[in-house]
């Protein structure tokens, strides 16, 4: 466990942005994490997980602590359910595939989402009709200042749409070290409510889908729409789907009758950000080495040597244009550093 200086973070962020950490250390156990925090009490710290949900726009003038805690296990089970724990540094997709191989249900719709297990509750990640909160039981987290461990229950995490307590009042205070999920062992609730999954299963001639079938369908869909970060730098969906008031939606709909939407409640409507961006003319556009993916307008990409500042400038241009044309503000889902 050696602290390194002026360390390149290019391979630690899925955008592939060249930025340097003033200091860098990887920790592999909670004990190592505790030691690093205690020995560097007065250092400014930056916690790094899988690097899949951030845009680096500058060097990090801090001690970057890379959370590389590995391991997964069953902690209890009964006839119907199993409680599985994944350590924070486990690759999320590999963890999902492991649960499917055990015939444990609940995470299959979130196959191929980039990132690590430890960051999934922070964002309350979700895809194709499911979110982390649907199977989440609890997570263990270390308080950065005191190194005390705390268990956060589902209620305490205060999950919302791509939201949690870790992005609000507990932001920057805790490091998640492990997460526990409650999954089904039988009578799985197969969720193919999203049309794309139904179409993909039909294409594969699957009539009675298994967990693996749903996972394979999601993987096929994501691969057709989203670039592999190893081949083309990106951070998945850059923007959140905006949830707006019914009144604001009706104003937008009056000008754009074809606008797709999902009714959230009597007062709120969700609009697909990808559609807004595509209609604004950005899909497939390129600005130097920064651009918008040709198959998915939600995804900003690095074609090779784009800086974080260049990608950020493209995102701001998109936000300003969408606001001007539709009167709808879209927020970044990615953390801009």
Image (cartoon, rainbow, N blue to C red):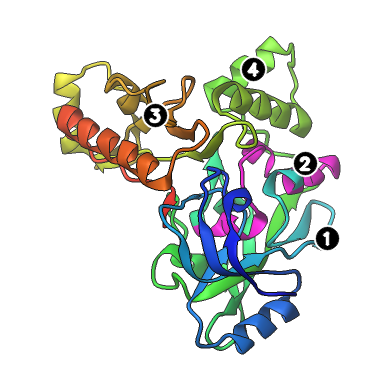
Give the residue at mark 3.
288
- Residue at 65 percent across and 53 percent down: it is 116
User: Residue 61: x and y, percent?
Assistant: 46, 69
In the image, is residue 227 above or below residue 153? above
Query: Sequence-wise, which precedes: disc 2 or disc 1?
Result: 1
**Mark 3–mark 2 CB contact (< 8 Å):** no
In the image, is residue 22 above or below residue 246? below
In the displayed structure image, the side of residue 285 where residue 53 appears, left or right: right
Q: Residues within 10 Å of mark 1 (few under 14, many from 20)?
A: few
Give the residue at mark 1.
74
The quarter of the picture where the C terminus appears is: bottom left
Magenta region, residue range? 95-122
**Mark 2–mark 1 CB contact (< 8 Å):** no
User: Residue 49: x and y, percent?
Assistant: 61, 59
**Mark 2–mark 4 CB contact (< 8 Å):** no
Q: Residues within 10 Å of mark 4 (few under 14, many from 20)?
A: some
Query: Sequence-wise, which precedes: disc 2 or disc 4?
Result: 2
């Amino acid at each position: 466990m050696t602290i390194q200086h002026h360390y390149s973070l290019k391979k630690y962020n899925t955008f592939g942005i060249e930025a340097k950490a003033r200091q860098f250390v990887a920790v592999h156990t909670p004990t190592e994490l505790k030691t690093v925090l205690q020995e560097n009490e007065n250092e400014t710290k930056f916690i790094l997980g899988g690097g899949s949900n951030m845009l680096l726009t500058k060097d990090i003038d801090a001690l970057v602590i890379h959370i590389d805690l590995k391991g997964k296990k069953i902690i209890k089970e009964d006839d119907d359910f199993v409680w599985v724990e994944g350590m924070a540094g486990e690759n999320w997709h590999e963890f999902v595939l492991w649960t499917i191989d055990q015939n444990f249900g609940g995470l299959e719709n979130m196959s191929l989402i980039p990132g690590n297990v430890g960051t999934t509750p922070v964002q309350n990640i979700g895809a194709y009709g499911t979110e982390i909160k649907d199977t989440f039981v609890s997570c263990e987290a270390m308080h950065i200042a005191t190194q005390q461990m705390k268990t956060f229950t589902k209620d305490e995490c205060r999950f919302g749409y791509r939201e949690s307590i870790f992005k609000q009042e507990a932001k920057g205070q805790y490091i998640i070290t492990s997460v526990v999920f409650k999954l089904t062992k039988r009578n799985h609730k197969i969720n193919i409510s999203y049309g794309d999954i139904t179409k993909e299963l039909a294409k594969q001639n699957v009539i009675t889908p298994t967990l693996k079938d749903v996972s394979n369908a999601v993987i096929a869909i994501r691969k057709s729409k989203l670039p592999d970060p190893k081949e083309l730098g990106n951070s998945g969906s850059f923007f959140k789907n905006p949830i707006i008031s019914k009144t604001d939606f009706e104003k937008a709909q009056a000008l754009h009758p074809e606008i797709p939407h999902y009714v959230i409640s009597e007062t709120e409507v969700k609009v697909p950000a990808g559609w807004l961006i595509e209609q604004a003319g950005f899909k497939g556009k390129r600005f130097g080495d920064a651009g918008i993916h040709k198959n998915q307008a939600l995804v900003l990409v690095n074609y090779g040597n784009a800086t974080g500042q260049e990608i950020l400038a493209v995102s701001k241009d998109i936000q300003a244009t969408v606001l001007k044309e539709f009167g709808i503000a879209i927020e970044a889902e990615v953390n801009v550093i």
